Image (cartoon, rainbow, N blue to C red):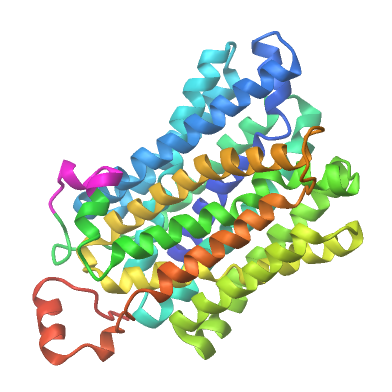
Amino acid sequence: MTARLPLLFILVTLMIDSMGIGLVIPVMPQLIREVEAGTIAQAALWGGVFTTAYAIMQFLCGPLLGTLSDRYGRRPILLATLTVMALDYVVIALADNIWVLLVGRVIGGVAASTRSVATAFIADISSSDQKAQRFGLVGAAFGLGFVLGPLAGGVLAEFGTRAPFWAAAGLAAANLALGIFILPETVTDRIRRPFAWSRANPLGALLDLGRQDRVGRLTLLFFLYQTAFFVYPAIWAYFAEERFGWGPRMIGISLGLFGISLAVVQGGLIRYVIRYLGDRGTVIYGLVFSACAFLALALVESGTVALFLAPLAALGAVVTPAIQAMMSRAIPDNAQGGLQGLLTSAGALAMVVSPALMSQVFWFSTAESTEFYLPGAPFLVSMGLMGVCAVVFLGRKRMPRPEEAAPEEAETSARTGGAVERR
């Protein structure tokens, strides 16, 4: 129980991060018009600015927080960012002009970069064989947050546009109080790493870690896969309305089913997939299954069939935790924070690129003047990206597991603080 409580705290923290993204969706258009009178179109423009600013700050700050945690420990960085997160929700709840809202979303993006520290904590407390399964729990926590965020935002909006933010502030504060009492420190002097600004930015982190066991190529694979997978939040609502004539209720139900399925797959099913297929086989299975799912969604014409396909598509979402586990095993213990910061930046960059790419493809394939009418065209782009991912992955040599390493390699790893199985 003592060992499980810190893991539970980390998962709740990650879920709150994910909820923070979805919580604002139902109320943000009205909140923007409250503080900045204008049309819904103008509110949408500001909403795009907020989303981009949030993602850019995650991109920039993921390696910074991860590198800081390699030097000063996971506990102080996690507790500090939770404090900032709680205060940020209070600021947004009290905002009376558009610029305060913008500052709030910028700060929120910085605080949400704590994902890099949280996943580094999980790497610290997990054995080599536990990494993929526990990184899957990270995906499950985000899946639950993806479901609960918009749902809670919609319900709480009945009490006013500020109510969801007050609730989020209270939740973050409660989680902070729990962390103060139960969160241990996992960074010891054996694996503590001096802070360096050269590693505390996305490019520097990539240059530093990319030299080790083809981490750079796996980072590219992670980015491409995330870009393809973000097609769901990027265009699903528009696709479902155009193709099936769905309203907000059916769109919400379908996204909820997808989020729950994602949590089940990454929180439970992945342990069995990894057990039977291994990391490499899991990645290949996930890429093939996702490509087939994207093709089916691109061509489906029945809303009923699509309602079943959306949650089934989550069965391919085993790629990300498998990649994270492979990369985590390949680098020294004292670089785990930097690695997770790099992956946080890659994911945030995908959040910027994917909506821009997918929305343009959707516009081109549904515009009145188009000669290529196909609302599901963005899913074809994602299917193509799965092919690129396969080329990137299969074009690399297999990373040896720690127990497969030659004796001299294991000895070198031990001297340099390399990844070892501690539990």
Image vertical order of residue 289 relative to residue 57, above or below: below
State which quarter of the image contains the C terminus.
bottom left
Image vertical order of residue 107 relative to residue 274, above or below: above
Q: Position of residue 344 (x, y in %)?
A: 41, 50
Total numbered labels placed on residues in the image: 0
Q: Residue furthest top?
A: 37
Image vertical order of residue 38 relative to residue 222, above or below: above
Q: Is residue 264 visible?
A: no
Q: Is residue 108 visible?
A: yes
Residue 116 is left or right of residue 95, and the answer is: left
Span shown in magenta: 194-204
Q: Is residue 197 magenta?
A: yes
**Residue visible at 76% across and 65% down?**
296
Picture quadrant where residue 203 is located: top left
**Residue visible at 15% across and 56% down?**
193
**Residue visible at 54% across and 81% down?**
271
